[in-house]
Image (tube, rainbow, N blue to C red):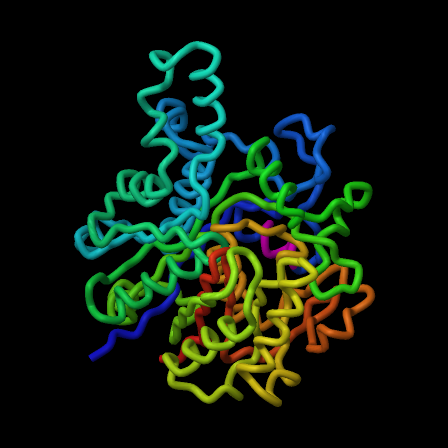
């Protein structure tokens, strides 16, 4: 018999806040986390803005020696995971069997800053000066590895790398791991830190990012006719997933229940989305959840603020839901957080859990002149109280990787 899977802990590192209260309040205030990039000189870049985490000090979360052996994306992942474990009131060594606690935390790109630093050392000082920590700091799976070391989780441990779908794939895979009985608890989500010279240059070369440098806070504007590309963010979003039986046994607080997961591949284009692929993904998630399409109340959209992507997702929602698409509330919180790439799905699943708990839908800010080809209800500019029962979160990545998860309000 399949196990029911609930959400018992949340942790976030974002430009909007490094604790749940600050982060949620920022969303409810419709605040943008986007500003001028400060981590390096961007004067020659077409895009000079991002949703940076300012003044992040890893030593607030772990000691200096450990911090020096982690890339920034791993630091975000570990910090958010420790927060989520604490939020869940979970003592892994005392409350459960550590071999039944797993970690699925992915990154779309991995340790790009470490790559850059060590490549510079290689060119300037030669191969013998490259750090012995270069490879373990850079590889994408080290987020999951370090989290297991810092928490004592000895169960299933893996890493998804599916570009911007990474975080949602990680959570969906963790959900299935518990559902089929292979673990009792999973630490799941994504982390990313690519606001770096090479990262920004690469996305600028793709002409994928907004160049609205004179109005950073208005640059990310999903579904608006004036959108001109995404705004990069950084950080981590982590969920503690737990079998209902295990959560009840230890008296855990429950944010919501994960009930469905869908995946698909576009088989279409390296970077452009195919609405048929995204629609199939949503349909699979709804069928996996065993609910009617009309039961879904809200979709946290992938909604990156690119001209092609937002239209494609709108088309996909209509293909998947038919007439019910026009009764759905759909919002893109990337309008505030920026696009966290591999971490986006983790942060947005966390937002869905908080929306269920607080019975309120976060808005799409900067939606001033809605694109007529994007003709759904995108909850413009103001949060909306709603009796949410079932919510969906979409993530779509380069390569045609699509992932969707569905949550519902917990009922015993």
117 lies above or below 324 = above
Give the percent coordinates (x, y) of residue 71.
43, 32
Is 63 part of what is drawn in magenta? Answer: no
Between 322 and 97, the residue placed more toward the observer is 322
Q: Position of residue 198 (x, y in %)?
A: 56, 33
Question: Is residue 361 rendered to the left or right of residue 366?
Answer: left
> Quick check: 19 left or right of 161?
right
| Extreme residue in the front direction | 268
Q: Is residue 383 above or below residue 56?
A: below
Residue toward you, 36 or 48: 48
Residue plotted at (36% across, 68% down):
6
Residue at the spot x=17%, y=52% of the render? Answer: 99
Q: Which residues are magenta?
A: 22-27
Residue 160 percent across, percent down from the top left: 36, 53
**Quarter of the rendering containing residue 370:** bottom right
Q: Nearer the viewer, residue 166 or 1?
A: 166
Q: Is residue 382 left or right of residue 395?
A: right
On the image, the x and y values in percent for residue 315 come to 62, 76
Quadrant position of the N terminus in the picture: bottom left
Q: Is residue 251 left or right of residue 239?
A: left
Instruction: From the viewer's side, name the closer residue of 394 and 62.
Output: 394
Query: Does 301 sit above or below residue 294?
Result: above
């Amino acid at each position: 018999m399949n196990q029911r899977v609930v959400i018992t802990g949340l942790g976030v590192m974002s430009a909007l806040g490094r604790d749940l209260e600050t982060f949620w309040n920022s969303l409810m205030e419709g605040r943008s986390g986007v500003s001028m990039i400060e981590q390096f000189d961007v004067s020659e870049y077409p895009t000079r803005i991002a949703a940076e985490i300012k003044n992040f000090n890893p030593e607030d979360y772990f000691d200096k020696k450990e911090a020096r052996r982690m890339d920034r994306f791993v630091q975000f992942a570990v910090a958010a995971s420790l927060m989520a474990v604490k939020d869940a009131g979970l003592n892994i060594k005392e409350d459960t069997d550590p071999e039944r606690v797993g970690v699925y935390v992915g990154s779309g790109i991995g340790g790009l800053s470490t790559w850059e630093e060590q490549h510079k050392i290689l060119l300037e000082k030669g191969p013998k000066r490259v750090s012995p920590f270069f490879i373990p700091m850079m590889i994408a799976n080290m987020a999951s590895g370090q989290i297991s070391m810092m928490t004592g989780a000895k169960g299933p441990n893996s890493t998804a790398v599916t570009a911007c779908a990474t975080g949602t794939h990680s959570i969906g895979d963790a959900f299935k791991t518990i559902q089929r009985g292979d673990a009792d608890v999973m630490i799941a989500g994504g982390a990313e830190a690519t606001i770096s010279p090479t990262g920004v240059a690469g996305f600028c070369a793709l002409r994928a990012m907004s160049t609205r440098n004179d109005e950073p806070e208005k640059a990310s504007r999903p579904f608006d006719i004036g959108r001109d590309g995404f705004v990069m963010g950084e950080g981590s979003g982590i969920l503690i997933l737990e079998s209902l039986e295990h959560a009840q046994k230890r008296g855990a607080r429950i944010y919501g229940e994960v009930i469905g997961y869908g995946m698909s591949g576009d088989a279409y284009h390296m970077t452009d989305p195919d609405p048929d692929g995204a629609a199939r993904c949503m349909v699979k998630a709804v069928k996996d959840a065993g609910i009617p399409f009309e039961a879904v109340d809200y979709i946290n959209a992938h909604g990156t603020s690119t001209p092609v992507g937002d239209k494609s997702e709108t088309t996909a929602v209509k293909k998947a839901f038919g007439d019910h698409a026009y009764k759905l509330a759909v919002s893109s919180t990337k309008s505030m957080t920026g696009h966290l790439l591999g971490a986006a799905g983790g942060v947005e699943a966390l937002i869905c859990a908080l929306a269920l708990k607080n019975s309120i839908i976060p808005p799409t800010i900067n939606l001033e002149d809605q694109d007529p080809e994007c003709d759904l209800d995108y909850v413009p500019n103001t949060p909306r109280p709603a009796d949410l029962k079932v919510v969906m979160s979409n993530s779509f990545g380069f390569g045609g990787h699509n992932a969707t998860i569905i949550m519902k309000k917990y009922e015993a």
